[in-house]
């Protein structure tokens, strides 16, 4: 990426202090993908950037530079996004961590950006104690598809239609593999679950449960087994609640 970019729709995925007064940012932009930005002086009391570098809030960012880390020149808050709290807040952190870990830098994904914007709005209107299972599964699947790891859900590894009454394992690079009782192999996923996921239909309790397990297995593979910090923190929070 070279030159200057002006008024680019974007969200802050992650920020950390840099030296005494600045911030290093990971931002997800509509037309330039994930970018690393240096917000000089953003931590100074009277900086125009102070208070704007928040996750989950729609921004317009302008930056310039030629290196791996670009210089943030301007930021404007666009408004309209409710603040996240409770379980939806942890869901948001989870999404951000997925994007930081899986999206390559400076690779545009405008459709994924639009999905991210919509799910943040859905999370903003969710009850404080509700995890948005359906929205998370749909986003996870869209993310893998954007990265070239699309799921095969309506046909098995031989190209045969999925049987809603069947039981299937799911192997990466091969897809669903039907199992029969005589094989003495634990079939993990119902055919109905795979078909529901293909239709983005998560009304069924079993579908939500099995879809979560399948996506966790797939993401663990593409994350090279790295445990997400957001998932660990949410699990610990659930453990200490009465």
Image: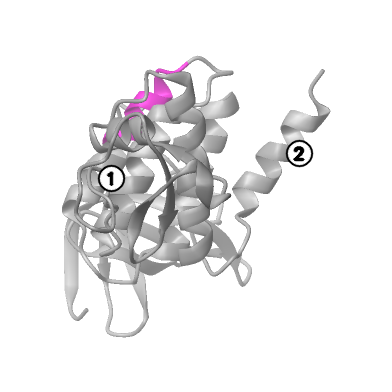
Q: Residue 11, how many percent across, how many down?
A: 35, 48
Residue at screen point 57% across, 61% down: 16
Q: Name the residue under label 2.
A: 236
Q: Name the residue under label 1.
A: 153
Q: Main secondary structure of the magenta part?
A: helix
On screen, residue 6 versus residue 215, left or right, reads left
Label 2 sits on a secondary structure element that is helix
Q: Is residue 233 above or below residue 227?
A: above
Q: Residue 193, how many percent across, how many down?
A: 38, 32
Residue at screen point 28% across, 48% down: 142
On screen, residue 241 versus residue 136, left or right, reads right
The residue stretch that appears in magenta: 118-126
Residue at screen point 34% across, 38% down: 194
Q: Is residue 119 magenta?
A: yes
Whether residue 187 is visible to the viewer of this picture, yes or no, is: no
Q: Residue 171, how many percent across, how many down?
A: 42, 60
């Amino acid at each position: 990426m070279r030159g200057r970019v002006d008024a680019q729709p974007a969200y802050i995925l992650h920020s950390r202090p840099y030296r005494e007064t600045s911030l290093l940012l990971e931002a997800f932009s509509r037309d330039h993908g994930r970018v690393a930005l240096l917000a000089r002086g953003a931590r100074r009391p009277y900086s125009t950037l102070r208070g704007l570098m928040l996750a989950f809030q729609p921004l317009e960012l302008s930056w310039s530079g030629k290196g791996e880390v670009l210089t943030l020149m301007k930021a404007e808050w666009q408004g309209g996004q409710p603040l996240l709290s409770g379980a939806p807040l942890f869901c948001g952190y989870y999404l951000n961590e997925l994007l930081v870990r899986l999206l390559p830098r400076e690779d545009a994904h405008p459709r994924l950006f639009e999905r991210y914007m919509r799910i943040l709005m859905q999370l903003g209107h969710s009850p404080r104690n509700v995890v948005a299972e359906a929205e998370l599964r749909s986003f996870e699947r869209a993310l893998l598809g954007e990265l070239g790891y699309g799921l095969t859900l309506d046909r098995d590894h031989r190209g045969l239609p999925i049987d809603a009454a069947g039981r299937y394992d799911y192997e990466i690079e091969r897809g669903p593999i039907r199992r029969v009782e005589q094989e003495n192999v634990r079939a993990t996923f119902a055919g109905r679950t795979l078909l529901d996921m293909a239709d983005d239909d998560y009304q069924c309790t079993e579908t939500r449960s099995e879809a979560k397990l399948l996506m966790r297995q797939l993401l663990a593979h593409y994350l090279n087994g790295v445990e997400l910090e957001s998932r660990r923190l949410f699990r610990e929070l659930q453990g200490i609640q009465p």
